[in-house]
Image (spheres, rainbow, N blue to C red):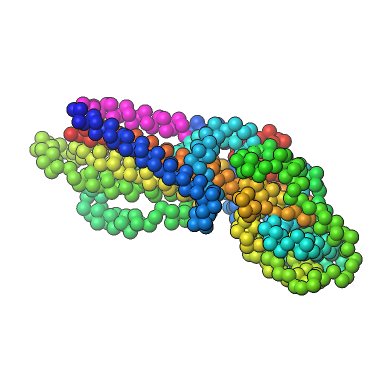
Amino acid sequence: MADKRWKRWRSVVIRIMAVLTFILIWHILIVIARGGNPFLTNYNLQSLPTPKETFDALIEGLFPHATGPLYQASLLDHAGASLLRVFEGFLIACLVGVPIGFFIGWNSTANDFLGTIIEILRPIPPIAWIPIGLLIFALNAPIFIVFLGIVFPIILNAAQGVRSIDKQFIEAAETLGAKRYNLLTKVVIPSAIPSIVTGMRIGIGIGWMCIVAAEMVGMRQGLGLGYYIWLAYDLYWIPSMIAGMVFIGIIGWIMNAVLEQFEKRLSRWRE
Amino acid sequence: MTSLTDNKRTAISLLIITIFLSTGCIEKNEEKSVTLIKMGGATMMTSMEAGTIDAMICWEPWNSLVFSEGIGEYLVNSSEIWPHHPCCILAADYNWYEKVGEEKGDDILKRVALAHLRANEWIDEALPKDSENHSKLLTYAKELTGKNESVIELANKNIDFDYDLDLIGIKTYADKLMEYGLFESSKWEASGYVSTDAYINSIVERKYISWAKEHEADTNLSLPEEISLRIGYLSADLHHLALFVAKEEGFFSDCNISVTLHDPFVNGAAEMQDGFKQDTIDIGYLGIAPATIQGINANDFDKNDARIKVIASVNYDGTAIMVRKGIGINSVKDLAGKRLAYPGPGTVQHFLLLMACEKSGIKAL
């Protein structure tokens, strides 16, 4: 027991050390570059902010003191806009992806037919869809890009979830007189849920990466973290630009941690 | 042991939190604000035609083109937002000046200002339709913008081509830029300027245009040896007509200056960053707002790589807010909740829009 607790503490300490080491190396590199090191200045590293300057810009971005029109939206507002787009894309991806995944996993003809199309479309990076997204969905293109990032992991995991059901469960249900509909709702869907949630977790991680890229490359409008980073770049607010990136990382990390916990709970229930 | 009910509860809570966070943040900001979308002039026009944007703020001749194609109509001319506001300026790279030396640098800049002044005088003379040089003026404008004659005729009426520097106007810009929070605070501190007045006084130099005025009629002012200059300007911006006139009418070559035009920049911020800072141009025609902002934000003060000297004005006014035809927007206030395209953060157009929105009590995000 004590050994287990020690291991957990050790893991926490190593994680904190990793973050601190990263920050320290970052700080040292910038200080050396600003000192005029020719190798680092060659890569313009002296233009980048130190961790402390980035932290200050992050706090200013979250709780702006300035009253100018560019500070009417805080980083939280921009994050909210990006999250909403991810949520919308996620919802549509679930509505489309889960039934398709079930169908593919359940029916071998569907697997051969739809599976082939999906396997051709899946390797196309979501970012490559941006121009066509802009053409068809105009300003809603980022939601479309998020949808594409999320839908394939959901389809594949839902299909995998259905395929991996223990045949004995199905046979037992059939022996007990379960009809095809009951078999699907009482046996197949509940058994596939953990796998679907895994697909959702992977998908939402990809979706989060996609939204920032879509907001950057597509029509940059109003609110959104991708837009915020470009706004900062256009105005050459480099500390705010890096602060926006750090905030994206923090949100992604929290989202992943929450979904991982959710997934763990679910798999415990399954056991 | 975790039950299924627990999981459902967790899932529902997560869902509610996400919806609450996302929708709450959006609605709070977008109801009373105009949503800004960054675009180039050509995309603005096609987007307005397709209905993906409701309004746009851009330089001429895009406004005149949108109007003459029947896609949009003028809501407000920039001269109504701020009468006779400074717009584009002629600037020289500070590092280039340091490199060539003060005496030689001054000699060259005096002649650049002279060529610019002569081009402006030429434009003034050629603007009336009955002028013998009018058709040549249209040819140069077409070469610069790629637009047809009727569009250029319309656009020319909205631009005041003027080389004289309005120091008070530029200082007003800088004060407003500071008030709007466009200067990056750590960079402003690093610059060491005690006030916006001190900053503007250090970058605006009127001596070149004053010399040019004094020597306008002199004919033998050629430099002893030919000087090559790399000049930057903005894409399809009719404000920069004087550059093409000076080049084509030989006002640069009269002074023994050979000019190479850099590929046009999409906006002033790009010209400051990719032009002056990256040392790809020596002289540039660009908006006063990006020139002033990036002169601080993009400048590495150890190297002064984005520092410029403003040597002449290029034009006043010449921007407008256009709205899609028949959309029912009759005032700047009506832009709340609508989508407006602009050339990018920190441009003259962005600045004028912020000013217009401030006057009308709406936000621009």
Residue with the most extreme bottom position: B225
- Seen at 73% across and 56% down, the residue is B91
Q: Position of residue A30 (x, y in %)?
A: 50, 47
Please identify the quarter of the rendering in which residue B340 is found. top right
Which of the image's four quarters has the N terminus of chain A?
top left
> Can I make out residue B138 in this image?
no
The residue depicted at 43 percent of the width and 45 percent of the height is: A25
In the image, residue B143 lies in the stretch drawn in magenta: no
Give yes or no for residue B13 being in the magenta stretch. yes
Residue B94 vs residue B138, the one in the foreground: B94
Left or right of A32? Residue B68 is right
State which region is magenta.
B1-22
Residue name at image x 49 percent, y 57 percent: A39
Q: Is residue A258 visible from the viewing direction of this image?
A: yes
Given residues B116 and A128, the one toward you in this image is B116
Seen from the viewer's position, the closer of residues B197 and A41 is A41
Q: Is residue A5 toward the left or the right of residue A86 in the image?
A: left
Residue A46, image x, y percentages: 54, 50
Q: Main secondary structure of the magenta part?
A: helix
Left or right relative to B163: residue A186? left
In the figure, is residue A136 to the left or right of B179? Answer: left
